Image (cartoon, rainbow, N blue to C red):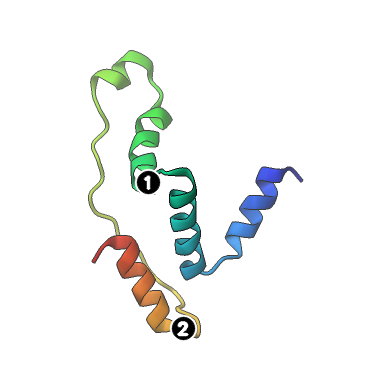
Amino acid sequence: MSKVENIIEEIKGLSLLEASELVKGIEQAFGVSAAAAAVAAAPAAGGGGAAAAAAPAEEKTECNVGLTAGGGNKIGVIKAVREITRL
């Protein structure tokens, strides 16, 4: 298993709160923003050459998320979701 695959497996095991802390830590360590990376990655993922460059992809402003289990720390999960969604 490669280093990247090992890291992905470790991330899969994180709780929502731990994942949020990881994102913040990466943002601080590298001076980047996860929100900016998501917007920048969207056009690159579309491909399509010049036609895709001429018509920028519509930015998605809403999404539906379902939380199936909050675990033992429901308040912490609610706080993490509010922080991530900036509510």
* Residues under numbered marks 2 and 1 in contact, where contact means CB atoms less than 8 Å apart: no
User: Can you say whether 83 is above or below 43 in the image?
Assistant: below
At 42% from the left edge and 44% from the top edge, which residue is drawn?
31
Q: Secondary structure at mark 2?
A: loop
At 37% from the left edge and 42% from the top edge, which residue is drawn?
38
* Quadrant in the picture for the C terminus: bottom left
Disc nearest the viewer among 2 and 1: 1
Q: Secondary structure at mark 1?
A: loop
Residue, far top:
50
Q: Foreground residue, 21 or 75?
A: 21
Residue 24 numbered tag: none
Q: Which residue is mark 2?
A: 73
At 24% from the left edge and 18% from the top edge, which residue is drawn?
54
Q: Decide if residue 72 is on the left or right side of residue 67.
A: right
Residue, far bottom:
72
Query: Which picture quadrant has residue 85?
Result: bottom left
Q: Residues within 10 Å of mark 1 (few under 14, many from 20)?
A: few
Q: Amino acid at mark 1?
A: Ser
Q: Decide if residue 43 is on the left or right side of residue 12.
A: left
User: Can you say whether 16 is above or below 37 in the image?
Assistant: below
| Residue 17 rendering spot, x and y as whole percentages | 46, 69
Q: Amino acid at mark 2?
A: Asn
Give the mark nearer the N terminus: 2 vs 1.
1
User: Can you say whether 64 is above or below 82 in the image?
Assistant: above
Q: Foreground residue, 53 or 23?
A: 23
Q: Which residue is mark 1?
A: 33
| Residue 53 rendering spot, x and y as whole percentages | 29, 20
Whole-number angstrom distance, CA of label 2 to CA of label 1 = 27 Å
